[in-house]
Image (cartoon, rainbow, N blue to C red):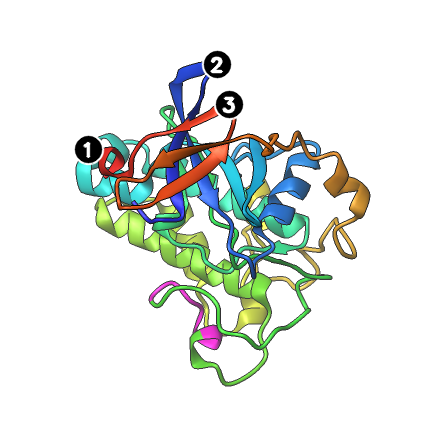
Amino acid sequence: MPRNILTVFRRSDPGKQLIAKKVCESSNELDILKVLNNFQPKSEHIISLLDSFEVESRTWAILPKMDSVIDYIQIAPGRLSANIGQICWGLIKGVAYLHGHCIAHRDIKPDNLLVRKDFCLKIIDFDLAIQVKDEDEEVDDQCGTEGWMAPEVEAQSSMYSPIRADRWSCGQVIIYLLDEFGKEDEPLSSIAMKLKVHSPRKRPSLLVCASGVGQCQGTEGWGICRAKGNFSASMLMHSGTEANSSILDTISAGMGSGRAVPSGWCSWPVALME
């Protein structure tokens, strides 16, 4: 398990394992997760932020612990195979929800997709995510993972729309999952191929695909973001409780150095998690 991830539990509920993730200093992940927690209605396909705290000027986010799509493919493919349609539609709905609130994920890939026990998909890892004004806003930095990035992002040759790039990555994941399990699903295959067209402006809005409107055509009027402007301070202020970090428990990391978590939380040694 990466060093920025710990398996933790509350002392009041030791039987329930959770994840503590060290938030990258340069990312907006915690702010974005807090804002998403405040939107109503919430999406069941976006990971929930349970808590957050600071230790030695570093921020940690507490998140639910689940297995990833990749975990299932490697360890229990048979269990995932029967639910691939549900997983793919969960991805479409989850990314559509983000885009509806003007948030581009920018690293859609199987590793960043978790699966609950009832096979409800959850999108995670908002390290690279940004808020945009609308789908026409463009950026010039290369973000994502090789093999899952849209052609215009990988080329690094021009400005691109992160919303439209997300659509391509979503289509790539759907095609990968259908091929991996030999599934023939005409509606999903058709959507995925349209999402992967070379011209970004011809990629259909996931908001349209998720709602089942028409034939999921790449019409440019769709996909208008509902959330305008930057994150508001009031949204961030009411985003759940901050754990009290004045009293720290230093827990052996099993790697020669201790790691601190706030009082009330416990952490297993890394050796027991791997």
Q: What element carries label 2?
A: loop
Chain-order first, disc 3 or disc 2: 2
Dot 2 corresponds to which residue? Answer: 12
Residue type at numbered disc 2: Ser
What separation in Å lies between label 3 and label 2 (alpha carbons)?
A: 8 Å
Residue 208 visible at all: no
- Point out the stretch of residues depicted in magenta: 147-153
Q: Nearer the viewer, mark 1 or mark 2?
A: 2
| Residue 214: percent from left, percent from top | 59, 48
Q: Is mark 1 on a helix, strand or loop?
A: helix
- 138, above or below 5, in the image: below
Dot label at residue 264? 3
Dot 1 corresponds to which residue? Answer: 78
Chain-order first, disc 1 or disc 2: 2
Q: Residues within 10 Å of mark 2 (few under 14, many from 20)?
A: few
Of 120 and 267, which appears nearest the observer? 267
Please say whether residue 220 is one of the residues in the magenta stretch: no
Q: Which of marks 3 and 2 is in front?
A: 3
| Residue 245: percent from left, percent from top | 58, 34
Chain-order first, disc 3 or disc 1: 1
